[in-house]
Image: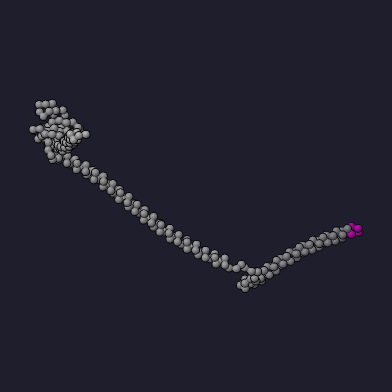
Amino acid sequence: MGRDEYLRIGDCRMRWFVFIGVCLCLSVAAGHAEETMYIHDSISHELGLREEPDSTKKVSDIIEAGPVEVLKKEDKWSYIRLSTGKEGWVLSRYIKSKKPISLELKEMKESRKKYDKFSEQIAALNEEIKRLKADNEKLASESVEKLKKIKELSSSQTTLEKELAEAQKVKPPGPASPPPKNEVKNEAPNKPKADLLEIFKNLEMNEMIKGALIGVGILLVGYLMGSISRGSKRRSSYF
């Protein structure tokens, strides 16, 4: 490949670079050419969007107060795009760079609504934070109490284990030993009471025996007297 061929290829590449650069510049310029302006509501008559920059031409739509995009200007006319997407011509004197008062008031009301909504959300979040903080403090307090109880139980367990170990060291008991003196002293006063009860029981038994014997004696005496009276009646009948 010769030198001329290299030059030709380089020239083609340069042209492509220039073409791409020009297209980028045009797109940027077109983007910057669009300008947001406003139709004021102070206009006493309806403002029409025309298909051509001429007052005698047909009106394609009615323009309401609000923002519009200015795409280009030509003499006393401006080619604009409405918020609905429709495009057309309108006299430039009706377009202002400053927002209309009605639009500013509307935006202020919307901003106020958003502020009030955010304020309510912030208040709700603050209440939720307070509740979570109170719950956290409560849980922390309960955790402290539980830890205290665990320590007390651990201390009691340690004490019981020591006492159990001491009890296991004690020798098993030997043969039965006589009861302590205090038990003997306690039983001594009770012995006369037992003797008295035994005496009373014996007396009651004796009284019962005596009563039975007296009853039997009375029956025998009655039987003998009855026999004697019957015998005397028989002897008297013989005479």
Q: Is residue 234 visible?
A: yes
Give the residue at x 49% y 63%.
Answer: 158
Identify the residue shown where x is 9% and y is 35%.
Answer: 93
The residue at the far left in this view is 75
Q: Is residue 162 left or right of residue 32?
A: right
Residue stretch rendered in magenta on the structure: 235-239
Q: Nearer the viewer, residue 31 or 199?
A: 31
Name the side, left or right, on which 139 lies relative to 88. Answer: right
**Where is 138 relative to 191, above or below?**
above
- Residue 190 seen in this snapshot: no
Q: Residue furthest right?
A: 239
Magenta stretch contains residue 74: no
Query: What secondary structure characterizes most of the magenta part?
Result: helix
Position of the C terminus by quadrant: bottom right
* Depth order, front residue of 203/43: 43
| Quarter of the image that includes the N terminus | top left
Residue 57 percent location from the top left of the image: 11, 26
Q: Residue at x 23, y 43 (%)?
A: 113
